[in-house]
């Protein structure tokens, strides 16, 4: 039970920061609602909110020293890297890690995004597709790949029920570890905290960068250590084509039998795809003062975004697809805190539409326009803290079909097309006749399940059709 003293000191602290307005309904709340609200208020770092709400005048990025980051291009000999990655997998040293705490507002799906029916023929939910891929890799390498999933307080319960209702997709429940990330309060454009209801603040998940703190606080890092995990395969919940256990990437990142790749410290590596065009809104891998980092699309000066080299190719073409390999040792170092005892990653600001409690209307109102600033940390900021960092090119068709928007680019429709393009190309490799439209897209829906093939060459022992007809729906 909260004491009167605690309530008065909370009031005093909120008052001192000009935030006492959020306590205006406190006395009208039921005892339980009041307790819950006071607990939420005591968790707010008022000084941090005040600092973040007022950007320093000199904070705008300047990129005098920006150069394209070097990367391992597609098409090289990957035999050694593959061998090293396979050895890591066989020895059970690799975990999977999905960040699934986002709100998925652009897609507008009712539940957690991982429950979205994502595949082009069977409509498999994203979580099921990942689980089946992990199970197939476990079978292939004779190992356990523990799966860590970061949810948020807003979607944790629903995500857990989804896994329970689906019997953990046939995998041992002890090998899936769900944990919620932290939240940050949203503020109005003049820095005021907002109520979502009379007894709760408007908060948002603290960004995928919140993973560092959450992996530590939840005990996930400790669990990895106890299991002998050395490397973590990091991916977002919205890309059904991600290759979770990619031996080539893991091998390049963690080191070959003959020693570490000189470009990697084995701490944090990334995959990139060549940007579609200058206007594509993805972060770009850059060399920032000698360190590899991701520069956000909106922070990139226009003359650099459109700059081309002697061959007419975009100079800054290494688009980030948010796939990383990260070592447990590196995560432990970050989680043990920077010099100021923080979790090391800075917060970014974004203007968003945040539902808020309106006293006059007596209800929570959905604003039509952005009305608030959200604070989020980004995982790619950890790259700057790695000693060295490797970037590997991959093919967009092979590995990147994100579902972000309800329509247009990065939507279910575009993802389905890329899925069919990938699987069509796999079949063509084995002589199957696959219909294509004039623009090169496959003119059929083709889904290849993880248990059938994790990559094209796995189809060598599979009975394949001789031809696929336009408009066919095929599941293998
Ligand atoms: P996005 O940047 O696409 O954000 O997240 P989002 O919240 O899912 O979607 P919108 O912007 O509201 O439409 C990229 C990945 O990072 C995860 C998401 O779940 C997704 O896998 N994420 C994002 C978190 O885990 N936590 C966060 O706080 C934010």
Image: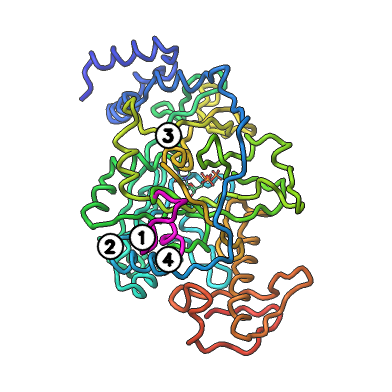
Q: Position of residue 417 (x, y in %)?
A: 65, 66
Label 4 crowding class (10 Å Cα cut-off): few <14, some 14-19, many 20+?
many
Of labels 3 and 1, the one closer to you? 3
Of labels 2 and 1, the one closer to you? 2
Q: Which residue extends farthest right?
A: 438
Of labels 2 and 3, the one closer to you? 3
Of marks 2 and 1, which one's residue comes earlier in the chain?
Answer: 1
Q: At x 73% / y 70%, what residue is drawn?
A: 440
Q: At x 43% / y 63%, what residue is drawn?
A: 130
In the rendered structure, does residue 252 fall within the stretch colored magenta?
yes
* Residue at mark 3: C-beta within 8 A of ligand 1: no
Q: Are marks 2 and 1 in contact (CB under 8 Å)?
A: yes
Query: Which quadrant is the N terminus positioned in?
Result: top left
Q: Is residue 160 visible?
A: no
Mark sitting on residue 173: 2
Q: Is residue 263 visible?
A: yes
Tell me the CA gap for discs 2 and 3. Answer: 31 Å
Q: Which residue is mark 4?
A: 247
Q: Which residue is mark 3?
A: 345
Q: Position of residue 409 (x, y in %)?
A: 67, 54
In the rendered structure, does residue 137 fall within the stretch colored magenta?
no
Query: How many marks do you count on the picture?
Result: 4
Label 2 crowding class (10 Å Cα cut-off): few <14, some 14-19, many 20+?
some
Along the horizontal axis of the image, is 397 left or right of 210? right
Tell me the CA gap for discs 4 and 2. Answer: 25 Å
Of marks 4 and 3, which one's residue comes earlier in the chain?
Answer: 4
């Amino acid at each position: 039970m909260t004491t009167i003293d605690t309530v008065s000191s909370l009031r005093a602290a909120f008052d001192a920061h000009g935030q006492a307005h959020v306590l205006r309904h406190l006395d009208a709340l039921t005892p339980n609602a009041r307790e819950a609200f006071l607990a939420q208020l005591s968790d707010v770092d008022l000084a941090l909110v005040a600092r973040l709400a007022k950007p320093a005048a000199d904070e705008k990025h300047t990129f005098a020293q920006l150069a394209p980051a070097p990367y391992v291009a597609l098409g090289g000999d990957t035999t050694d890297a593959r061998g090293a990655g396979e050895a890591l997998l066989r020895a059970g040293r690799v975990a999977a890690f999905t960040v699934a705490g986002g709100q998925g507002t652009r897609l507008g799906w009712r539940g957690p995004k991982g429950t979205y029916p994502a595949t082009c023929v069977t409509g498999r939910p994203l979580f099921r597709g990942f689980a089946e891929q992990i199970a197939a890799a476990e079978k292939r390498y004779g190992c356990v790949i523990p799966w860590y999933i970061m949810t948020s307080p807003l979607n944790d319960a629903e995500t857990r029920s989804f896994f329970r209702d689906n019997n953990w997709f046939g995998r041992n429940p002890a090998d899936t570890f769900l944990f919620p990330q932290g939240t940050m309060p949203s503020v109005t454009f003049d820095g005021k905290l907002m109520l979502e209801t009379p007894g709760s603040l408007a908060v948002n998940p603290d960004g995928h960068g919140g993973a560092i703190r959450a992996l530590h606080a939840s005990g996930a890092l400790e669990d990895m250590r106890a299991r002998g995990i050395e490397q973590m395969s990091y991916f977002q919940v919205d890309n059904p084509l991600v290759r979770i256990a990619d031996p080539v990437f893991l091998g390049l990142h963690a080191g070959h039998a003959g020693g570490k790749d000189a470009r990697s410290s084995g701490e944090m590596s990334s995959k990139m795809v060549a940007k579609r065009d200058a206007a594509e809104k993805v972060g770009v891998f850059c060399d920032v003062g000698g360190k590899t980092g991701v520069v956000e699309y909106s922070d990139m000066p226009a003359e650099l975004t459109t700059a081309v080299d002697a061959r007419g190719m975009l100079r800054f073409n290494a688009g980030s697809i948010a796939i990383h390999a990260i070592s447990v040792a590196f995560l432990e170092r970050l989680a043990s805190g920077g010099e100021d005892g923080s979790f090391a990653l800075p917060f970014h600001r974004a203007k968003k539409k945040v539902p808020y409690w309106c006293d006059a209307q007596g209800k929570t109102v959905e604003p039509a326009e952005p009305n608030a600033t959200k604070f989020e940390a980004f995982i790619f900021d950890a790259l700057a803290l790695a000693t060295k960092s490797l970037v590997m090119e991959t093919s967009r068709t092979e590995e990147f079909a994100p579902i972000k928007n309800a329509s247009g680019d990065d939507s279910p429709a575009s993802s389905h097309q890329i899925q069919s393009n990938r699987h069509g190309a796999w079949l063509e490799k084995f002589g199957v006749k696959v219909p294509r439209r004039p623009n090169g897209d496959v003119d059929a829906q083709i889904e290849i399940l993880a248990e059938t093939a994790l990559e094209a060459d796995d189809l060598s022992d599979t009975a394949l059709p001789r031809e696929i007809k336009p408009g066919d729906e095929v599941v293998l």
